[in-house]
Amino acid sequence: MHKFLLLAGCQLIALACASPKYLTYEQFGAKGDGVTDDFPAIIATHAAANEKGLPVRATDGKTYYIGNAKGTAVVRTDVDFGTARFIIDDSHVAVEDREDYIFRIESTLEPFAIDGIGSLKRDQPSIGRSLPGRCLVEVANDNHKVYIRLGANQNSGVSQKEFFIADREGNIDPSTALVWDYDEITRMTARPIDDKPLTVKGGVFTTIANQAPSKYTYYGRGIAVERSNVRIEGLSHYIEGELDHGAPYDGFLSLDTAADIVISGCLFTAHKTYKTMGSAGVGVSMGSYDISAHGCANIKWENCTQTTDINDTHYWGVFVSNFCKSLTLDHCVFSRFDAHQGVRNVTLTGCELGHTGVNVVGFGRLQIDGCIIHRKSLIALRDDYGSSWEGEVIVRNCKLIVPEGAKSVSLLRGSNTGKHDFGYTCYLPERIDIEDLVIDDSRVSDKDYNGPMIFGKFKRDSNEECLYPNIAKGAVNIRNVEVASGKPLGVSIEPNMFRDYTITVR
């Protein structure tokens, strides 16, 4: 590593005289032969580029090998990976730091604490404080726990927190508005949003998968985006060498506390599903997401797809998010859209979603337009977080293709017995509008199948007291639903639970 740092220093002197338009990895010692470990040279190149304010360009036709050494290439300038290939070899017995990311896209703007605000209210229009510029703000109450997970991966919850965008005057972007009251604030942090966009283009990345035990010892080893106002175009990620076991990955492309991101024309790969022991002491399925977003706002994926069959159940879902707001998928083909710990406002347009479908918990508006979904339910509300959606669901011009072997079909599915405290009140949508929906249930062969239901079975025993019930009331408007089997659309096999809905089917 020392010789590369020395080389980097010499190159900086030369570059000061030459005034190049961009830097290459070869200028800092990379071979690009697919055998030599080029990671130190890659790190040095980006360090120099950050210092000089220059973009980086990989060399077309080269293959850069990245071994198991500790380190991260910090990216603060534009990058064009072109058609170059990158091999990330995680098959070694010991990767020096499995949690490290190979590339981390950073801002030069430092986060700062916001002090002196004692409380905030849901949908409050402003924080009542000016800021140096547009910021992604995190607010938290560490004395209250939410998302107290139920099931095989049960836990004691996380601190109540959320992320929103505020402008220079402190006005909160309505699409990222607060979803909870904060009668107490233990911390509040602002991350400035860069005015100038940063662009990352191209690159063909292949991960040679780790061979670690199938435990929740997550690997990073991809690209972390921790800067706002970023566009990623034309990137491809493949996976090779997966065995019948392995540790999970956080996501090859991992967005963390960032805003205003566009991911365009990218190709991802789903990981194999493994088995492990859950926190409740029972066996669970375990997998990796190739795309993840945490604490983000105003993020869009457009024209993205995956290499693996979206309906192959041997592979885990490709997409996950936590604590995000204003997420958009536009003409993407993924095995899954999954919002774990609360999303506010989701738009899915022209997408095709595979065997794990649409899984959400959250708030605001969930809008699905012109999508094809391969599952027995149009929308699944995650039961490990209370099957809660506080807001509205709008579905237009979609098709639900029910897989072979399904015994029931529903438009909205979830489960909540009312006996578990998730740290918040759970709701079912107050408004559900569905228009021009085709339900292909032609492969449902169960002789007891009576047809699709608006609401799936929520496992609610009406004779038992619900200490923590879903609030289930509002309006359901359904128009022009075509069912392949010819069977009528029913309400639910638990109609009493949905008695406070006004339901109109035309």
Image: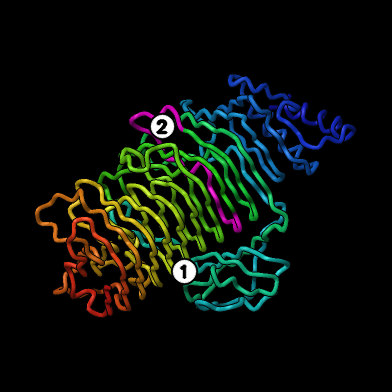
Residue that mark 1 sits on: 143
Magenta region, main secondary structure: loop
Amino acid type, callout 1? Asn
Q: Nearer the viewer, residue 429 or 29?
A: 429
Residue 147 in the image, given as x and y percentages of width and height: 39, 63
| C-alpha separation, residue under disc 2 versus residue under disc 1 | 36 Å
Quadrant of the drawing holding the C terminus: bottom left
First in sequence: mark 2 vs mark 1 = 1
Residue in view at x 27 percent, y 76 percent: 503
| Left or right of 263 in this view: 445 | left
Q: Which residue is mark 2?
A: 212
Task: State which region is magenta.
Answer: 239-261
Q: How is the image coloured?
A: rainbow
As drawn, which residue projects farthest toward the left? 447
Residue 350 point in image, percent of width and height: 45, 54
Seen in the picture, residue 454 relative to 317 is either above or below; the reply is below
